[in-house]
C-alpha cells in the first residue's frame, strides 16, 4: 500500500510542486532592465483592424512604496499627454505578476529572461471575455512586454499591443 502512495505522489503531486517552484518571479528578475530605454509601442486598432506603431520610451525602476513593484515610467514623445507610470506588481509569493499567473519563466538562448503570464479578463471594443497573455522579455539591453488576447470560444491569439525597448 505504501508503494502505491509513493507512486501516486511521484506521478501526480511532485510535478505540481516542481512547477510551482519554477514559475515564480521576483523584483530581481527585472533588475537587468533598470534605467532608461527607448523604443516603440505597437498596438492593434480594433476599429480598423490594423496595427499602429508610435515612439515610446520607458524608465524602469523598483518601487520605493511597494517592495514587490516595478515602475514603468512611460514617455510618448509624440503624445506627451499620454505619459504616465504603470506598476507591475508581484504577488502571491511571486506566482502572480499584475494578477496574471506565471505560466512560464525561462532563459532564452540570447541570455534574456522570458516570463509569460495568463489572466482571464475582458478586451476588445465589445468588452468580450478573453484570456490575456503577457510575454515579458528582460535583459541588460532590452525590455519588451507583448500582450496577446484569445477571445472566449476561439483558438486564435491576437497581438493586442507590444512595447519594445532597447539601449
Image: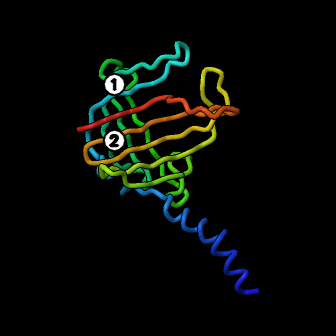
Task: Give the structural element (helix, strand or loop) at label 1.
Answer: loop
Quadrant placement of the C terminus: top left
Label 2 sits on residue: 143
* Separation (CA) of disc 2 from disc 1: 16 Å
Residue 115, position as x, y percentages in the image: 44, 49
Q: Residue at x 54, y 67 (%)?
A: 18
Decide: few, some or many residues near mark 1? Use Cα within 10 Å; few <14, some 14-19, many ≥20: some
Residue 56 occupies which quadrant of the picture?
A: top left
Q: 83 and 120: which one is in front? A: 120
Q: Residue at x 33, y 24 (%)?
A: 76
Residue 32, position as x, y percentages in the image: 29, 51
Q: 61 and 17: which one is in front? A: 17
Q: Find residue 76 and name its label.
A: 1
Task: Give the structural element (helix, strand or loop) at label 2.
Answer: strand
Q: Say if 136 sits above or below 67 in the image.
A: above
Residue closest to the far right: 1
Q: Residue at x 67, y 78 (%)?
A: 7
Quadrant placement of the N terminus: bottom right
Residue 30, position as x, y percentages in the image: 36, 51
Q: Say if 40 sits above or below 86 in the image.
A: above
Residue closest to the far left: 167
The answer to whether residue 30 is visible is: no
Amino acid at each position: 500500500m505504501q508503494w502505491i502512495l509513493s507512486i501516486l505522489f511521484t506521478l501526480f503531486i511532485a510535478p505540481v510542486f516542481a512547477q510551482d517552484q519554477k514559475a515564480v518571479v521576483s523584483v530581481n528578475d527585472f533588475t537587468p532592465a533598470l534605467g532608461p530605454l527607448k523604443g516603440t509601442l505597437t498596438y492593434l486598432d480594433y476599429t480598423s483592424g490594423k496595427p499602429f506603431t508610435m515612439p515610446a520610451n520607458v524608465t524602469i525602476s523598483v518601487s520605493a512604496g511597494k517592495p514587490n513593484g516595478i515602475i514603468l515610467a512611460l514617455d510618448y514623445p509624440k503624445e506627451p499627454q499620454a505619459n504616465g507610470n504603470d506598476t507591475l506588481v508581484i504577488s502571491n509569493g511571486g506566482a502572480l505578476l499584475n494578477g496574471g499567473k506565471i505560466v512560464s519563466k525561462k532563459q532564452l538562448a540570447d541570455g534574456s529572461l522570458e516570463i509569460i503570464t495568463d489572466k482571464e479578463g475582458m478586451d476588445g471594443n465589445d468588452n468580450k471575455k478573453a484570456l490575456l497573455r503577457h510575454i515579458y522579455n528582460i535583459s541588460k539591453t532590452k525590455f519588451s512586454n507583448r500582450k496577446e488576447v484569445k477571445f472566449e470560444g476561439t483558438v486564435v491569439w491576437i497581438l493586442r499591443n507590444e512595447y519594445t525597448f532597447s539601449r
